[in-house]
């Protein structure tokens, strides 16, 4: 694979253990230098750093692009939930 891109169905509703397995399974099929593109992953703002960023950082991939956007702006009327989107382009290390 050159790129693995989990779609909109990959988000905070997936149990942490299953999501961790998904990231490591993506790692298994990627060759050194290939890309993991996490696109429109959404979660609560408080969970982003505590759970999901730590999970992705364990892969030790190089960050090409990392963007976090407020989901409450994208979905009008969703202001009470304090949710964010994460889009990240990560490169599997060569070593």
Image (cartoon, rainbow, N blue to C red):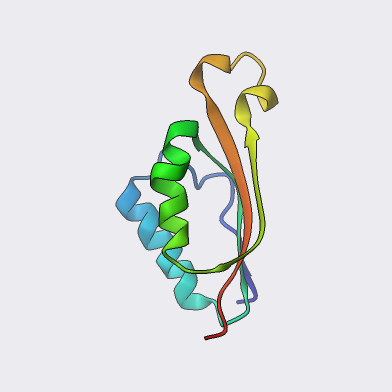
Residue 39: where, in percent of width, then height?
Answer: 63, 50
Q: Is residue 72 shown above or below 43? A: above
Residue 76: where, in percent of width, then height?
Answer: 67, 17
The quarter of the picture where the N terminus appears is bottom right
At horizontal 34% and vertical 48% (from top left) the residue drawn is 16
Residue 12 visible here: no
Q: 52 or 24, which is in the foreground?
A: 52
Q: 25 or 43, which is in the foreground?
A: 43
Res. 89 image quadrant: bottom right
Q: Is residue 44 shown above or below 39? A: above
Question: Would residue 76 appear left or right of 46 to someone viewing this image?
Answer: right
Residue 1 visible here: yes
Residue at the left extreme, as displayed:
17
At horizontal 30% and vertical 53% (from top left) the residue drawn is 17
Residue 84: where, in percent of width, then height?
Answer: 57, 34
At horizontal 50% and vertical 76% (from top left) the residue drawn is 29
Q: Is residue 1 shown above or below 57? A: below
Residue 12: where, in percent of width, then height?
Answer: 44, 40
């Amino acid at each position: 694979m050159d790129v693995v891109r989990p779609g909109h169905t990959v988000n905070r509703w997936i149990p942490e253990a299953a999501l961790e397995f998904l990231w490591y399974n993506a790692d298994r099929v990627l060759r050194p230098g290939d890309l993991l593109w996490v696109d429109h992953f959404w979660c609560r703002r408080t969970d982003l750093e505590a759970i999901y960023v730590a999970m992705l950082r364990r892969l030790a991939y190089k960050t090409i692009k990392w963007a976090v956007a407020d989901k409450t702006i994208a979905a009008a009327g969703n202001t009470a939930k304090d949710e964010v989107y994460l889009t990240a382009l990560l490169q599997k290390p060569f070593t």
